[in-house]
Amino acid sequence: MAVNSPLQRREQRVVIGGALLAVVSVLLANVALPFARHWSAREAEIRALRAEAASLAGLVTASPRIEAEAGAQERALSGRARRVFHARSMPLASSALQALLQDAADAAHLVVTRLDVAQTAPGSDVAAAVDSSGSSLPATLVAYGDVVGLAALLDQLTRAPRVVHVERMTVQQNSSLRGAPDMLQITLALRAPVLLQ
């Protein structure tokens, strides 16, 4: 059989073409497509980083304006008459509420006999007395005085710099001071919203 017969040449071309097609397919599948995927992923990452850099540059440029607006908002908030308690922990908020209630009672000329903030059992945690949302602190104030003192206390709580809600109020004639019919025993159940920082 002659080497250059037309049938042999045709078979050689088919084999070479098949081998060439296999090599191209392998190169395409293992080199070109991964390179294209890597390239497009890298380009997408570069675009995202450029967008983030532009956003950060815009924030840096706008920083003085943003700080001025934040300062103005803070001044507007601090200028308001009533705000919630801000504290780093519930014991600090409890202490601030206790001081506010004692000052209000003193200004109203009431004699405080009991002031419990976040009533807890001995050995329990103050945070356990906080309501389920964790956003307010309960308190009980028991004092004695007259009707004028009660009105002054309620006025003090209304105009206090911090928000304090009176949930329940009980007023009784003080049985231990029978000689002073105008003396009242006042019991207030209070709750103050707290924002932990």
Image (cartoon, rainbow, N blue to C red):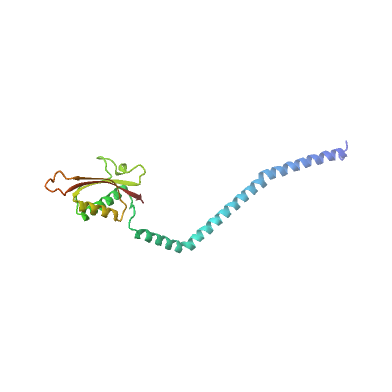
Q: Residue at x 81, y 40 (%)?
A: 12
Q: Give the side of residue 102 with respect to residue 64, left or right.
A: left
Residue at position x 71%, y 43% in the image: 25
| Residue 123, percent from left and from top | 26, 40
Residue 21 location (% of width, % of height):
75, 42
Residue 109 drawn above or below residue 23: below
The quarter in which the N terminus is drawn is top right
- Residue found at the very far top of the displayed protein: 1
Q: Position of residue 173 (x, y in %)?
A: 18, 45
Looking at the picture, does residue 7 appear above or below residue 74?
Answer: above
In the figure, 57 relative to 88: above or below?
Answer: below
- On the rendered structure, is 76 left or right of 171? right
State the residue in front, 118 or 171.
171
Q: Quadrant of residue 73?
A: bottom left
Q: Give the farthest residue toward the front.
A: 181
Measured as percent of width and height from the top left, residue 47 is found at 58, 54
